[in-house]
Image (tube, rainbow, N blue to C red):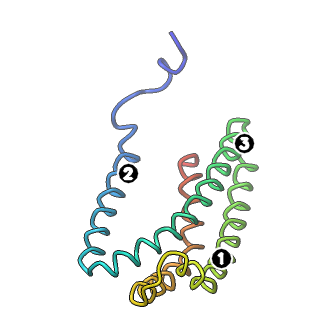
Amino acid sequence: MKWWVTELPWTPLNNTPVSLMMMSNSLAFMFQNRLINYFGAYVAAAAAIGFVLMDLADAALWGFTNSVATMVGQAIGAGLESRARSVAKKSALYIGFSSFIGSIIVYYTRGFFIDLFTDLPVVYSEADLFVQLFAPTLAFFAVFFVGMSIGRLFP
């Protein structure tokens, strides 16, 4: 018999926290879309433009956080808990600071990015407001993503 069959208890309860997180994330996304569509076509178009910028940041963050999770996991597997904690702290600081600088760049160049997607003044003003509201939160979400990626490894 294989080691993972005898040493790890495989029950449906093992997957419950991650399943609940994914289900609540999907439900929140549906409510978010309903709320956005309630305000009409211009707001929906502006939100789509803003979400393109958010998805670009999201893709970069997933790339960074997956590599952090790999380094932390390897350090824990090698029995180097202090190195794992050091990697986690340094990466949170680096990614948080980099995202803060990136959010400043996005905030001040938002007009250029919005112009790539629309020429309607109403949609432009709504997209501009959307980016003004979400750009300052990028650094917070970056640190949150790091916490999610390494938080699954530390009890």
Residue at 55 percent across and 62 percent down: it is 58
Residue at 47 percent across and 84 percent down: it is 119
Along the viewing direction, whichever of 77 and 131 lies nearer the viewer: 131
* Residue type, label 2: Met
Q: Give neighbour class at mark 3: few <14, some 14-19, many 20+ (Cα, 10 Å).
A: some
Picture coordinates of residue 96 (x, y %)? 65, 70
Would residue 151 appear left or right of 83 to someone viewing this image?
left
Q: CA distance from mark 2 to mark 1?
A: 27 Å
**Tag in front: 3 or 1:** 1
Q: CA distance from mark 2 to mark 3?
A: 27 Å
* Residue type, label 3: Ala
Asked which quadrant contains residue 91, the reply is bottom right
Residue at 35 percent across and 43 percent down: it is 16
The residue pinned by badge 2 equals 22
| Callout 3 secondary element | helix
Q: Earlier in the sequence, mark 3 or mark 1?
A: 3
Residue at 66 percent across and 44 percent down: it is 70
Give yes or no for contact between labels 3 and 1 (Cβ–Cβ under 8 Å).
no
The residue pinned by badge 3 equals 75
In the depicted structure, whether residue 8 falls above or below residue 19: above
Q: Furthest-top residue in view?
A: 1
Q: Give neighbour class at mark 2: few <14, some 14-19, many 20+ (Cα, 10 Å).
A: few
Q: Earlier in the sequence, mark 2 or mark 3?
A: 2
Give yes or no for contact between labels 2 and 3 (Cβ–Cβ under 8 Å).
no
Would residue 66 appear left or right of 84 to someone viewing this image?
left
Picture coordinates of residue 71 (x, y %)? 71, 46
Picture coordinates of residue 111 (x, y %)? 57, 85
The residue pinned by badge 1 equals 100
